[in-house]
Image: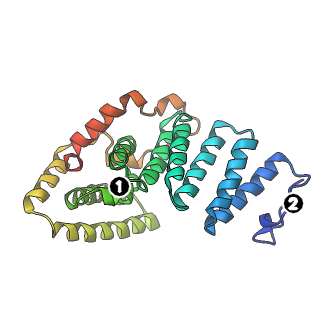
Amino acid sequence: MFSPNLNDKFWYRDVSKENQTATAITEIDLFRVADFYSNGDYEAAKQILTDLRENTKNNRTHEIMLIDSLLQCTKEGGLCQSETDYCLRLLSEYESLLVDSGDQVQFLRTKASILAKFDKNIEFRNTMALLCHLCGSFDNWQLFESGAKFFNDVELYGLKMKMKKVLHYEIDHSRGFVKEKLEKKLKKIEEEEQYLAGKLQQDDIDSILSSLNSNKDVISPESATSFVFRAHDSRSKNKLIPVADHPSVISDFFHRFPFLS
C-alpha cells in the first residue's frame, strides 16, 4: 500500500514507483509536476504531463486538467513558433472536451492568458468578450490587463472604470479578509484610473462613463458573484456558449462596451 513519508517535505522526489498502484504512481507524478513548476523547470513538468496523457487512461475531467497544466507550463517556459502551434493545438483539443459553462470559463481564462503572450490582438479581445459575457466577475475582467499591450489609453481607462464598478459590488457583498483584499485592489485600480484620466480628453472620459452608465450588462456584477455551480445540479442548467453563437455574443459585448471596439 502506498504510504508517503510525511516527515519529509519532498518525499515524492525520490520515492520509488515500484510495486505502487496506478493511482499512487499518478499521484507521485503530479506532486513532481507541481514541484518542477514551482522551481521553474517547466520542461520537466511538461514531460511528465505528456507521459500521463499518452500512457494513462484519463477521464474527461482528468484530461482537461492535464491539458490546462501543459498550457500553463508552456506559457511560462516561453513561446517560440513551434510552441505557439503546440498551444493552439492543445487549445483546440481542450475546447472539444467542454460540456458546461464551468468548463468554458476555465478554458477561456487559460486561452486568454495564452493569447496575451501571442501577437493575437483580435483573438484575445474576442476570447475576453466571451469570458466576461459568461461570468463578469472582477477576476475575469482583470484578465484584460494581461493583454494591456493591445489597448490604448482610452480603452484601458474604460476597462479600469468597469473593473471599479464590479469591485464596488463585490466589496459590498463581501466580509472580513475577503473584503479587505478587494478594497486593496480597488485602491490600486483607482490610482491607475486617475493616472490614465490625466492623459485623456474630457470628451473621451465622458463618453466612456456614459456607455458604462447606460448599458445593462447581460452578466451583471450581481450575477457574477453568485456564479457558483452545485455539484448535484444537472449540467444542462449550466450551458456553455455554443460555438455557433460566439459571433453574436462577441458582437453584443462590444456593442455594450463601445470603448473596446
**Which of the pair 131/215 is nearer the observer?**
131
- Is residue 99 left or right of 7 when viewed as pictured? left
Looking at the rendered structure, the secondary structure element under dot 2 is loop
* Residue at the spot 46% in from the left edge and 32% down from the top edge: 239
Where's residue 28, x and y in %?
77, 57
Residue that extends furthest to the front in the rendered view of this protein: 81
Tell me the crowding category of disc 2: few under 14, some 14 to 19, or many 20 or more residues within 10 angstroms, Cα based. few
Number of dots carrying numbers? 2
* Residue at the spot 68% in from the left edge and 60% down from the top edge: 44
Where's residue 172, x and y in %?
33, 58
Residue that extends furthest to the left in the rendered view of this protein: 203
> Circle 1 is placed at which residue position?
144
- Is residue 224 left or right of 91 when viewed as pictured? left
Residue 235: numbered disc: none
Q: Is residue 172 visible?
A: no
Dividing the picture into quadrants, the one containing residue 144 is: bottom left
**Which of the pair 229/24 is nearer the observer?**
24
Spatial CA distance of label 1 from label 2 is: 44 Å
* Residue at the spot 24% in from the left edge and 49% down from the top edge: 260
Looking at the rendered structure, the secondary structure element under dot 1 is helix
> Circle 2 is placed at which residue position?
16
